[in-house]
Image (cartoon, rainbow, N blue to C red):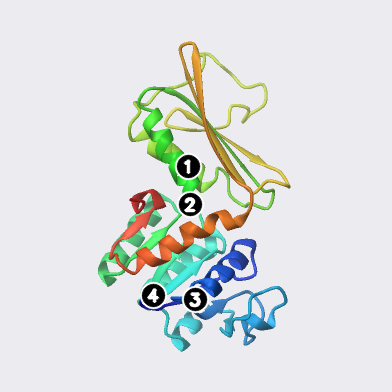
Amino acid sequence: MEPIKIVIAGPRGRMGREALELIHKTEHFILVGAVDRTNEGKKISDIEGLPPLDAVIFTDLERCLQEVNADVLLDLTTPEIGRAHIKIAIQYGVRPVVGTTGFTQDDLKELELLVEDKKLGAIIAPNFAVGAILMMKFSQMAAKYFQDIEIIELHHDQKLDAPSGTGIKTAELIAQVRDSKKQGHPNEYEHIEGARGAEYDGIRLHSVRLPGLVAHQEVLFGGEGQTLTIRHDSYNRASFMSGVKLAIDTVMKIDLLVYGLENILE
């Protein structure tokens, strides 16, 4: 396969460390640079606990892309930084693969136009775990037969956004095949505000944040005399790497913005 030259943003985070191991062991992936808040001018191999890769670390993505020849930006930072990085990458003709969440519909429309103008591929993935993508697709299938649905997403206590990108994406997929419906008793009320969770098109979303968790979600369907639960659990961040690899390989072959790995799974 043709080599793919990669810049990674967020190399010292938990996802970043797993992604560096993926790049290190994938023959056609080449790390050509990294973007980090600190460690300007050091190499990845200089940082304790990171693999022996010689890519130089920059604290500014634009300067990094001015100095290295990259094909793909793998961004595993925060929603705010990710939104800025994806625009910079597109400006320099680098294809973004973004694992951060928090993109609004307006953000996606703007990015879609930028990608079309540059004729580049870009992938934004609320979740890189293939099992989680299947959980979302199965939930969309089930929503044709069960109208009453609640989503519970559970993550580690350092996650910044709620609901999670996966939770929102699941609700969006379900809403495509389900008629809008206000669930529960028509006169229900909350003794404590927020007890019924967030609401998306009548679907209730609940966010749990606890130490010890990684990324988990269950979708509960209720019907006459029966319930159905579809659940996915990621117990470590290695579970996301098959999706990261798929996204990097795929982004080199497309010239449009893809939001969600379910759109590239065959």
The label number, if any, that marks residue 183 in the structure image? none
Residue topped by disc 2: 126
Q: Position of residue 189 (x, y in %)?
A: 59, 19
Residue topped by disc 1: 168
Residue 218 against residue 110 in the figure, above or below: above
Residue topped by disc 4: 94
Residue topped by disc 3: 7
Between discs 3 and 1, the one toward the N terminus:
3
Between discs 3 and 2, the one toward the N terminus:
3
Quadrant of the rendering where the N terminus is positioned: bottom left
Seen from this angle, which residue lies furthest top? 225
Crowd class of label 2 (few under 14; some 14 to 19; many from 20; radius 10 Å): many
Task: Say what amino acid the circle numbered 3 marks.
Answer: Val
- Left or right: residue 209 versus residue 67 is right
Task: Say what amino acid the circle numbered 1 marks.
Answer: Ile
- Left or right: residue 77 versus residue 92 is right
Q: Position of residue 108 (x, y in %)?
A: 37, 55
Mark 1 and mark 4 in contact (Cβ < 8 Å)?
Answer: no
